[in-house]
Image (tube, grey):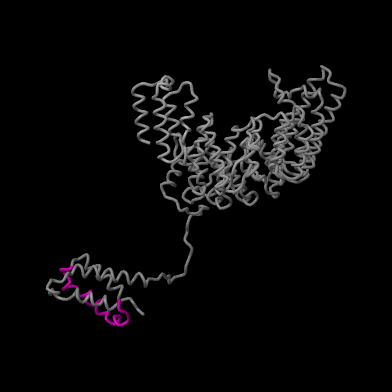
Amino acid sequence: MDITPVYELKARLRAVAIAGTNLLAEDFRLKRAAEAMQPLEAASPVFARIGELVRRLLAPETEENGKTADKEGLLLDAITLVDALLCTQGEVAVAEEITPLALDNTGGVMNNAPYSDLKAIVDALTNSGGGRYSYLTEMHERKPELFYDYRIKPALVKALGASYAELAEDVQDWLTHMGESIIPLLEKGFDPKGKKEMFRRVEVIEAIAGAGENEFYVSQLPESEKEVRQALIYALRHSPENEELLSALIKTEKGKAKKMAYYAYACMESDAARECVAKLAEKNVQEAAHILGTSGTEWASQMVQTLIFEQLDKLEEKTGAGIAPEMQEAVIQDLNGLGFYLEALKGKSGRVVGECCRRTAVLADKPQIMKLLLAGYIDQRGNIDHTLKRQLAKRVREYLVLCPDREMISLVLELYEAYRDTQAGEAYFPAALLAKLLSEEDCTQWLWNELDRTKIDVQQFANALSGLFWDAGRKTWVMEAVVYNTALEKFIRLVLPVRQRVEGDFLQLLMGKKDGKSYKWAGRLDRVLGKCIPDSDQNYESQLMEYFYQRALQGSEEIFYCCTQLRQHGYQKCQGIAINYFKNKKQFYVWEILNILNALPGTGEAKRAEAQELLEMVKSDAYRKRLRDASEFQMEHLEDVVRSI
């Protein structure tokens, strides 16, 4: 059925609404549209009703039921009915060939989020000023999905050049986890002669795509300068086809660009690359060790093992019958050389790491070696952390972080078992705990046993677990670690999924509770527990919230942290938190009271009740004398604040 007359009638009725009903008698176009509607009236009662309304509208002024016809009302009724009819008859069609829209590829999606939230994030990313860093990190932790919105991503890329280094580094990490969809936006408008933003773009691209964007690295290299050039050269390591180019760059580049060419060339699995680094090792041991430390090639593993064994042979020969005074300086130099090669052992195969660590651990356990500090770390206090034994123990954790496979886990636990009762036992503990967390076996009982029988103190225990947190994106608990990348000259953040089940017995251990008793570390792992709250397990969450509430009631130094956790998770109570805090203080100030009231969790009613009780307490004679700034003005201000809660 052709409903074109209905569309024509709609247009004429709207024209009448604009011109006015007093001109109806002269509107021949409306009369013609009404006549065209007549054949349709028999098809449906709706069409018949529309025709009737239009005829009454066009009729001369007459009396209807004793009243003059309401032309304006009839016009509105007709327009409304025609619009309603056409809404049910609409269709979308394109006669021409359909072509895709030419949209910018921002590698993102649109989130169902208010523009006000997104605009605040964009402003914080693109503008300067204090407070924006903490706002962005908090928003990313609370609502990470907003940062995947296509309206946010251009501002994220721009923020790679932020003058505030911590912000730029965090943004770089966020972009790296967004995957390949962000690459077109990073390459759009790329300036090879640019500054910080551009070299960080290269680092994000190569971290995501590796060899997949080799054409981009090579194409941008001729025009590149300074840090951008260095980043592009280092990115060439991903593709074996760049071997000849890197060999040429080693000969033509200078300074840091030449060093980057060495680092990238050492990642090539070829005899030419091996010979190049071997020649460098003859001239500069430390530089060669740094370069070998970033290479994952088989020849690099073999070379590092050979160099370590040669160094160990020399040290064993010099220290076999003790260390003569005149030999002490030479032994320390050899120890430092060994230290360089132990750094180069990072990222190597488990077999090579195992053989090197076992031999080094035997040497480091010799009494004459244990007394020597590494030359680069000598201080007036004679810090035992700078002995070879302690340094090896710390290195072992780095090896595990970079290669968390079964062979490396077994090696770490083997070394800890062998030396846990020695002075280096607590130094091996963080690596052993990480190995257990990464294992398939539950480690709760093992950890109870170790904490009961070893000299591990509470702070060491807390430090070893400081990287444990719930990763909302991965929906699992993870262990965060940082390792130093000598090529990039900065620490790299790594996140390792843990297999240990945190709920249940392990949670009780972290709280310091067992069989109804509290242990020495009870309350010392608040910040670890605060990062381990999943967003999907209400039972687990409620246990931790009750824990933080009890901790807050104790008036501990972590009260503000505990209250923050309670507020963020919507805890409903606050009774006794502020009261108990000030009961135990010998003196306090009004500003402290205001801080506590501002930090309280709970409903509005609960906070008002706590604030009122606290106000009455501090106004009493017993507590008024403890208040150090109890002026009339200050007390009036405090009362106003309490009333406003």
Residue in view at x 77 percent, y 22 percent? 371
Dividing the picture into quadrants, the one containing residue 19 is bottom left
Q: Nearer the viewer, residue 289 or 77?
A: 77
- The image position of residue 515, as x and y in percent, is 65, 38
In terms of image quadrants, where is residue 370?
Answer: top right
Residue at x 69%, y 30% (from the top left corner): 456
Residue 250 placement (x, y as % from top left) = 69, 39
Q: Is residue 381 left or right of residue 151?
A: right
Q: Residue furthest right?
A: 321
* Main SS category, magenta section: helix
Q: Quadrant of residue 300?
A: top right
Residue 204 drawn at (x, y percent): 58, 45
What segment carries the magenta color? 21-46
| Magenta stretch contains residue 43 | yes
Foreground residue, 396 or 426? 426
- Please tell me which residue lies in front, 123 or 231: 123
Q: Position of residue 253 (x, y in %)?
A: 65, 38
Residue at x 61%, y 33% (from the top left corner): 522
